[in-house]
Image (cartoon, rainbow, N blue to C red):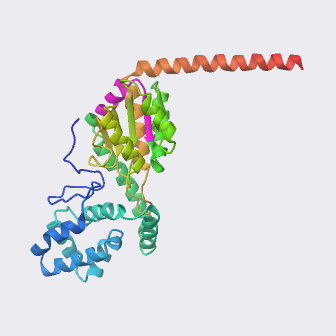
């Protein structure tokens, strides 16, 4: 499958020329600033010092707020971002948010975001714009080639086990139902139920496929399962936020989607849309299977209803 450069994501636009990734796949902003510190001007060092000391605040501030807090101009902050290799302040802030999120719990992130949002008069418009941008970025990343590679992995599978955790479980459930709808034998695996996971893995047959879905902070259970599947040679595909995410290393097919939100730790808007794209693409790839499945469903539904009505009538006659 054609993949972007390692570390690419749909968490922001553009490309950075200088990148230091942390172990979770995000850009390590503090280390990046420190590595470039000697090459920065006095004003840029002041901005860098402010970011280093207030990273959790900067990632939720506007350009104007950051410039005022650092005692400089908006244009100077933009030049600072450019010198570090980012396309703009939004690109820089998105990467900083990813870095900070890895070090904050969802509750801490929500509290910090809510505090910053209450000071932002345009927050409602930004929330709407973020959701729209999330969909745009995800659709741009889901090229026909990448979507076809993912669907091809599904078509080759005998059975599909879909796994998600917490908010990702919503997406996993949605995807499993859509796969069933178009004739694929698929089921949701409860990652919090050890015996459910054990049963799926131990009784997996050659040709079965696991689809893992995970977003920051990447469930330890899902990560552990991904590592085991890779070591055991069991086929795996995944949906995540970046190609360098911890669960993508052993996947034969990867789809990425943006999960940014102005308030909450993750947004599922784009992921739900991506699950629908996968279901539709699978139906179009194998229309005969989808139609045959629908016919079997219709036949069963008719026989089941007729049988239930017949037995109900017999029971009424007995009374």
Q: Can residue 176 be seen in this view?
A: no
Q: In this view, does 281 lie above or below 268?
A: above
The residue most toward the left is 39
At x 40%, y 43%, the residue is: 213
Quadrant (top left, top right, bottom left, bottom right) of the C terminus: top right
* Total numbered circles: 0
Q: Is residue 214 above or below residue 55?
A: above
Q: In this view, does 43 lie above or below 5?
A: below
The residue most toward the right is 319
Quadrant (top left, top right, bottom left, bottom right) of the N terminus: top left
Which quarter of the picture shows residue 313? top right
At x 28%, y 32%, the residue is: 149
Q: Is residue 135 visible?
A: yes
**Residue 201 on image: x %, y %:** 42, 33
155 in the magenta segment: yes
152 in the magenta segment: yes
Magenta-drawn segment: 147-163
**Residue 45 on image: x %, y %:** 17, 78
Q: In this view, does 28 lie above or below 193?
A: below
């Amino acid at each position: 499958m054609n993949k972007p450069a390692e570390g690419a994501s749909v968490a922001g636009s553009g490309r950075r020329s200088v990148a230091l990734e942390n172990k979770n796949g995000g850009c390590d902003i503090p280390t990046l600033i420190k590595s470039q510190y000697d090459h920065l001007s006095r004003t840029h060092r002041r901005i860098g010092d402010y970011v280093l000391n207030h990273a959790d605040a900067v990632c939720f501030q506007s350009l104007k707020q950051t410039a005022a807090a650092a005692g400089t101009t908006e244009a100077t902050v933009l030049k600072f971002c450019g010198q570090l290799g980012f396309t703009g302040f939004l690109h820089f802030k998105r990467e900083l948010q990813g870095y900070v999120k890895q070090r904050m719990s969802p509750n801490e992130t929500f509290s910090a975001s809510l505090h910053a949002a209450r000071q932002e008069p345009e927050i409602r418009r930004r929330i709407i714009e973020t959701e729209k941008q999330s969909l745009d970025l995800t659709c741009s990343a889901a090229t026909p080639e990448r979507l076809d590679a993912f669907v091809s992995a599904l078509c080759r599978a005998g059975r599909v086990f879909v796994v998600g955790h917490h908010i990702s479980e919503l997406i996993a459930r949605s995807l499993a139902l859509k796969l069933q709808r178009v004739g694929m034998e698929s089921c949701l695996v409860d990652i919090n139920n050890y015996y459910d996971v054990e049963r799926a893995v131990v009784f997996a047959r050659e040709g079965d496929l696991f689809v893992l879905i995970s977003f920051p902070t990447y469930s330890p259970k899902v990560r552990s399962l991904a590592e085991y599947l890779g070591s055991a040679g069991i086929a795996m595909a995944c949906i995540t936020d970046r190609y360098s995410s911890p669960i993508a290393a052993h996947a034969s097919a990867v789809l990425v989607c943006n999960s940014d939100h102005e308030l909450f730790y993750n947004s599922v808007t784009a992921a739900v849309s991506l699950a629908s794209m996968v279901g539709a693409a699978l139906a179009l790839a194998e229309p005969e299977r989808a139609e045959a499945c629908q016919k079997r469903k219709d036949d069963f539904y008719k026989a089941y209803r007729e049988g239930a009505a017949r037995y109900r009538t017999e029971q009424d006659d007995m009374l």
